[in-house]
Image (cartoon, rainbow, N blue to C red):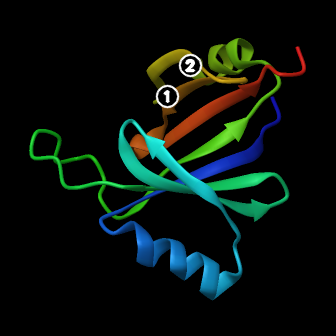
Amino acid sequence: MNAVCHHMHIVCRDLEPVVAFFQEGFGVPLIGPQSFGGAPGAAMDLGGGVLLYIVQRNPDPLNPDKPVGGWDHIGLQVENLEAALDHLKSLPGVRVTKEPFNAGALRCAFVAGPENILVEVVQDTSAS
């Protein structure tokens, strides 16, 4: 199975300075505002087809392990989501944390690897 980087998610407490950091510090263009489960966010273009999603999140007292500030997950694009999940589930310490779902032209699922490293596995279904 081969995968390419599709996107990365960053979580923060204050959206505007984080967006400005990437815009002004690295010249990363803003695609526009975006909502993530009702939380404010932004989509930015890292180039080469890789997107950077930034979501503003407040600490969750009911889920203290949910990150606030820093990297949340990386999204890796595969050709066949089901085959990729079958392969990943065969590896030690890997579990599916969110079953496949549709997000527009994308079919996605989340897996946690060793040390709870979170990966969103993405298949672009627009060409199908």
Q: Nearer the viewer, residue 116 or 25?
A: 25
Q: 10 Å neighbourhood of mark 1: few (<14), some, or many (≥20)?
A: some
Specify the quadrant of the image occupied by residue 4: top right
Left or right placement of residue 72 versus residue 79 in this view: left
Tally of numbered discs: 2
Label 1 residue SS: loop
Q: Secondary structure at mark 2?
A: helix
- Which residue has dot 1 on it? 94
**For this rendering, which residue is in front, 13 or 99?**
13
For the point 67% across and 19% down, the residue is 87
Q: Position of residue 11 (x, y in %)?
A: 40, 58
In depth, the one of 100 and 90 nearer the eye is 100
Relative to residue 73, is residue 17 depicted above or below?
A: below
CA distance separating discs 2 and 1: 6 Å
Residue 53 seen in render: no
- Of the numbered discs in the image, which one, if any, rests on residue 116? none
Q: Is residue 67 left or right of residue 3?
A: left
Pointers 2 and 1 in contact (CB under 8 A)?
yes
| Residue plotted at (56% across, 19% down) | 89
Q: Position of residue 18 (x, y in %)?
A: 46, 74
Asked whether, in this view, residue 62 is left or right of residue 75, the answer is: left
Q: Nearer the viewer, residue 43 or 59?
A: 43
Q: In the picture, which quadrant includes the N terminus?
A: top right
Q: Which residue is mark 2?
A: 89
Q: Where is the C terminus found, in terms of image quarters?
A: top right
Question: On the rendered structure, is 17 left or right of 29?
Answer: left
Q: Amino acid at mark 2?
A: Lys
Q: Is residue 123 above or below residue 42?
A: above
Q: Residue furthest front?
A: 32
Crowding around mark 2 (Cα neighbors within 10 Å: few <14, some 14 to 19, many 20+) is: some
Residue furthest to the bottom in view is 25
Question: Which amino acid does the dot numbered 1 rest on?
Answer: Val
